[in-house]
Amino acid sequence: MEQLKHECGVAMIRLLKPLEYYKEKYGTYLYGVNKLYLLMEKQHNRGQEGAGAGVIKMNAPAGHEYVFRERALGANAIQEIFSNINTQIENAHIQDKSADWIDEYAPFIGEVYMGHLRYSTTGRSGISYVHPFLRRNNWCSRTLMLCGNFNMTNVDEIFNAVVEKGQHPRIYSDTVIILEQLGYALDKENSRLYHEFTEKGLDGIGRAKAIESNLDLRNVLESAAPGWDGGYVICGTVGSGDMWALRDPHGIRPAFYYHDDEIVVVASERPVIQTVMNVARKDVHELMPGNAIMVSKGGDVKVEEILPHGKNERCSFERIYFSRGSDADIYKERKALGRNLADKILQGVDYDLKHSVFSFIPNTAEVAFIGMVEGLEKYLDAYKADKIFQAGSEGLLSPEIIQNIMAQKLRIEKLAIKDIKLRTFIAEGESRNDLAAHVYDVTYGIVKDGQDAVVVIDDSIVRGTTLKQSIIKMLDRLNPRKIVIVSSSPQVRYPDYYGIDMSRMAEFCAFRAAVQLLRERGQEHILDEVYREALRQEELPHDARVNCVKRIYEPFSDDEISDKIAQMLTPDDCKTEVKIIYQTLSGLHRAVPDCPGDWYFSGDYPTPGGNVLVNRAYINFYEGNHDKR
């Protein structure tokens, strides 16, 4: 019901054959450009703030550009980028040109392609923050282009390490700092090879080509990556043609790849590669945590462990909310999340299915809704069987009775439709809230006045703003006897620091509810004690710190917090009783067993940096620094 800012998406392509091969087989030199466009468009859900694309031409002669980049801001950034790219290609009049001419003159047609979709998680925006980032050099083997889906939690430490080496980063952001750090490591690798081949008697162009052909990306990555704390998929390409993608050792951020003798493809989501490359699921591989897929200038493809494999912390929120539901496993998991909630929903409607109407908001919750319906139908089937058995044991069974029992069905309806034309940006204050209440159109004539309960499922309830300003008000107009809001994910209690825009403590309705309960029950001293402990933790080494904020929730059950959230989010003029039901943490892990990362629900951060930042976020909350994260 409320949109979270998505984490970023990445796409990389390396063509392993000469350009004329793709012209002859697929009829166009634009094979790589077209595939990059599709990979990015199919991941549009992962970034609507901006996008960027980059291309490396491996065979461009000296004096001709070999690195191309386009970046744009806004929801239509992908279309803008590729419109500009296509215009430049059309202006070059590439029709019937030779491969040599294409290598020399054609813009954006090369062997290495990089795409990025951006949703900022740090509050910084603008074209200068849009990936890919570029570190140019007159030496192709020292030119570096970088993009990623990541957030580093120890940016200060990485920044200081970069500065101490004598570098001067232009911008204080994790992307620029990582670019400079990797650039420094790439320079070192170049210097190593420069001395090695000089000693072997090479110089000039021969030495430069030998360096390009022998770069060891493993050396580059092992020089920088051990100092990173965060969730990441870091993608890079060298101007001479080497390419890599490295995943964090806990697998927090997702990455998948496919390769054959023609192409190497990397993307953030498996079904995207399946669709774009028209390949089977089994042919698309997960890039394992701590591993990198590396492609040399010569086209050798390696997948190697760069960092020791850590504890499995694959992001469960990725599965619940961000990834495309067309993935076979994600589809099953989201259905299981819905099924898990059936018992609590039945309790919430007093087991009165005859007078309950079930729906979902928004469309992303549809798969969880299907699973919820399956769980409720399982109960209903058992209920019918029991009634038939009972009637039979009493000698009352007849075709009419059987027909009446079997006629009982779940009442599944489309209660709300989002009015995508409605915009509230021109209003402010109460007038904006009034307009927000009309973002969804309600379907009248389905709910029996004062008799029916209305149950709607969402994939997550994080801040609760849209619930209070729009959804509950809208459903209240139907005059049901009860409104039950269901979240397929557990209560989001803690900020995320690994790539999802959930970083301010006071934004979470679960946190606000726990604070309100402490104050109502005379336990406000806990807020003070947690603040003092968080300050004390600031003096400890990063790996010795713990999440102090957990104590805020300890006095209360999940249901107590859910009930307080319902009370807080119910508008003052709402006539109907409102109940909110959340997924349990155990239910989450049953439904999503292979992605146990749950720090936003449990507070168990996968790296020391998470504990550092959550304590700092609480200090900012306590001190009233609401603009700080």
Image (cartoon, helix red, strand yellow):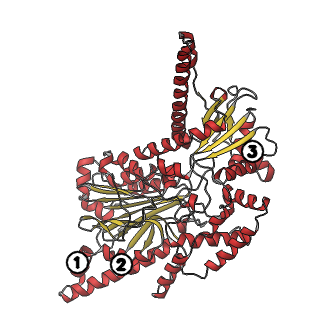
Which quadrant of the structure image shows residue 604? Answer: bottom right
Foreground residue among 284 and 299 = 284
Relative placement, left or right, of 186 versus 24 is: right
x and y, in percent, of residue 51 in the image: 49, 59
Which quadrant of the structure image shows residue 481? Answer: top right
- Secondary structure beneath dot 3 equals helix
Q: Quadrant of the C terminus?
A: bottom right
Relative placement, left or right, of 222 versus 561 is: left
Marks 2/3: CA distance? 54 Å
Foreground residue among 320 and 212 = 320
* Position of 67 relative to 76 (above/below): below
Foreground residue among 605 and 266 = 605
Residue lying farthest front?
Answer: 394
Q: Residues within 10 Å of mark 1 (few under 14, many from 20)?
A: some
Residue highlighted by disc 2: 186
Residue highlighted by disc 3: 435
Look at the image and tell me whether residue 134 can be seen.
yes
Look at the image and tell me whether residue 464 can be seen.
no
x and y, in percent, of residue 378 in the image: 51, 31
- Secondary structure beneath dot 2 equals helix
